[in-house]
Amino acid sequence: MRSILALSLLSACGTFGGGSPYHEDLLPQEDRVRINLPVDSASAKDAETGEWARYYVLTRTVTEDVNGLITFVLGTVGYITTLEPQWSDTDSRQAVWGPYSDSGLDPVETGLWVTEEDDGSYSWAIFQLPKGGDMETEAIAIITGVVDAGSTREDASGVFQVDFTTASELDPGVALTGLFSVEYTYDPVGGNAVAGFEDYGYAIGAERINALYAYSQDVEGAGTMDLAWLDDVNATGVDEILAMRTRWESTGDGRSDAIVTGGDLGADAVYASECWAGDFVTSYWTDTIGLYETVGDVGACVYAEPELPTEASFSIAE
């Protein structure tokens, strides 16, 4: 098993041995890495009325945040690889794009480095250096990744990690700090991914996020997403562990089951479950501490039985 999730940058159809380090088919498959959670409903109420299903809103918010980070990485790689590499060498099987800068106010230049390893995998990095700096001595990787050997456009696996702390030290325009790490695998049937946030948050501000996120989704649109994060639920200075599993059909019908444990709760645990139909309005709610009034009947749920994430939920087996 590897350290955590993400992106098909290169595939076997474009190799350095063929004389060119780049081919259009090597572009990332963003739609296979992103979570495609159903979001549209003509009958769903405005979120401010409180009639959206609570856990649906949380699930959608998290997926939008994670998708935004993935798009940031894929967008950067996609833009750079529309250009010709500045340097490539078939003997060492390496290529470099850039470095480039966006404008006169940009304090850094950005580039992409790729190499084919002896085992057929690809290592890659998006690097930055001070504008006008020496690439040999001042280039620093802010995103690093590996594409597994044998990956193709339709069947791929790999990992990447974004170091926002380093990026913010190089460029004051980067407002985030911490690490965002991703591991993924997908094939024509569906995809699986795990992402981790470590001390992640705005560079200015005390709040930091430490969380794990995992999803499995088939090509028809049904999926499962697991979340686990630390939070001081009762504001006593001690973090509890919150974990939630959300399951949904391509129609949008879904169910979330959550547990809060640890911290001041000790051996006790708090449970909650919520279901919704394709209108994303709560059809069933229950929790063990009366946090909200019980609503509906479990018979209305698209999934009759509760499911919670486990430690194994946040890993992808080789």
Image (cartoon, grey):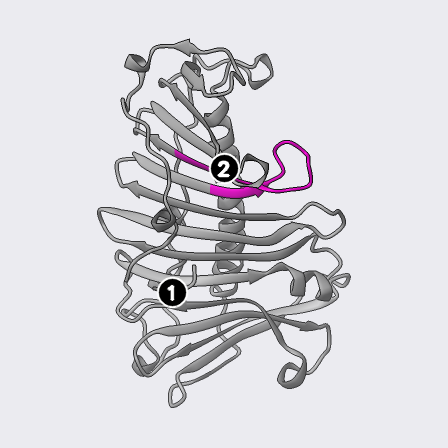
For the residue pair 202 and 284, the one nearer the viewer reads as: 284
Q: Nearer the viewer, mark 1 or mark 2?
A: 2
Q: Secondary structure at mark 2?
A: strand
Mark 1 to mark 2 CA distance (whole Å): 27 Å
Q: Does 105 lie within the magenta span?
A: no
Where residue 262 appears, as percent x and y from the top left, is 52, 40
Residue type at the position of mark 1:
Arg
Position of residue 75 relative to residue 19, above or below, is: above
The residue depicted at 35 percent of the width and 80 percent of the height is 16
In which quadrant is the N terminus drawn? bottom left
Q: Does 238 lie within the magenta span?
A: yes
Residue type at the position of mark 2:
Thr
Where residue 194 appears, as percent x and y from the top left, is 41, 51
Q: Quadrant of residue 165?
A: bottom right
Q: How many marks?
A: 2
**Residue on which the image places disc 1:** 2
Position of residue 278 relative to residue 71, above or below, is: above
In which quadrant is the C terminus drawn? bottom left
**Residue on which the image places disc 2:** 261
The residue depicted at 35 percent of the width and 25 percent of the height is 254
Q: Quadrant of residue 305?
A: top left
Q: Which residues are magenta?
A: 228-245
Position of residue 164 relative to residue 205, above or below, is: below
Left or right for 270, reference 139: left
Crowding near the residue tagged with mark 1, few <14, some 14–19, many ≥20 C-alpha atoms within 10 Å: few
